[in-house]
């Protein structure tokens, strides 16, 4: 399940034990979130980037043809469990590799992880209401197993 704040994406639930959950932060190098740059439409994978302060990310697999620049907004793409258009951060550095097919972008997260105290857990939407809720007749199987309601 995705974890967010009003500022943006924090990460996702990694493990649950009893009443507690471990969160894999978006700035963790093991994290991978599908993101998009709304200005150019370019898509890539956001991964945590180890460094001096620990609160940096990088977008990998963004094609060279995508015109990314510093200051571009980064949002979730709507794939892999995250709702679409949740803010992630802003591009702080663009590194183009002339020999490769992709470029790497450094991202400054919108969430201030050093001051993080409360988060929201995005749960799955409720299932649609059953239009025949009061009209169910018991099902009796003619052979084998059946579903009883």
Image (cartoon, rainbow, N blue to C red):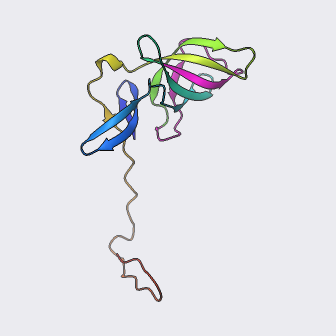
Q: Quadrant of residue 9?
A: top left
Residue depicted at x 49% and y 36%: 84
Magenta includes 68?
A: yes
Question: Does residue 40 appear left or right of residue 26 in this picture?
Answer: right
Residue depicted at x 58% and y 17%: 105
Residue depicted at x 40% and y 41%: 1
Q: Quadrant of residue 12?
A: top left
What is the magenta range?
Answer: 57-83
Given the current orientation, which residue lies at the most extreme right position? 99
- Picture layout, residue 125 above or below residue 24: below
- Picture layout, residue 121 above or below residue 125: above
Magenta includes 63?
A: yes
Point out residue 132 in the picture as x, y percentages from the top left corner: 38, 71
Q: Quadrant of residue 22?
A: top left
Marks counted in the figure total: 0
Given the current orientation, which residue lies at the most extreme bottom position? 142
Point out residue 48 in the picture as x, y percentages from the top left corner: 48, 23
Point out residue 17 in the picture as x, y percentages from the top left corner: 29, 44
User: Which quarter of the rendering shows the C terminus?
Assistant: bottom left
Question: Does residue 95 appear left or right of residue 49 in this picture?
Answer: right
| Closest to the observer, 48 or 76 | 48
Point out residue 7 in the picture as x, y percentages from the top left corner: 37, 23
| Closest to the observer, 34 or 85 | 34
| Closest to the observer, 114 or 81 | 114
């Amino acid at each position: 399940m995705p974890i967010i704040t009003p500022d943006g994406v924090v990460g996702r639930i990694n493990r649950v034990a009893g009443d507690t959950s471990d969160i894999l932060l978006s700035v963790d190098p093991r994290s991978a979130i599908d993101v998009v740059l709304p200005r150019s439409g370019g898509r890539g994978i956001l991964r945590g980037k180890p460094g001096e302060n620990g609160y940096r990310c990088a977008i990998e697999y963004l094609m060279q043809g995508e015109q990314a620049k510093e200051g571009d907004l980064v949002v979730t793409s709507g794939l892999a469990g995250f709702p679409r258009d949740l803010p992630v951060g802003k591009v702080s550095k663009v590194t183009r590799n002339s020999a490769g097919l992709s470029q790497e972008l450094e991202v400054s997260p919108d969430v201030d992880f050093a001051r993080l105290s409360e988060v929201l857990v995005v749960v799955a939407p409720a299932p649609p209401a059953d239009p025949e809720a009061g009209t169910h007749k018991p099902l009796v199987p003619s052979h084998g197993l059946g579903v009883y309601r």
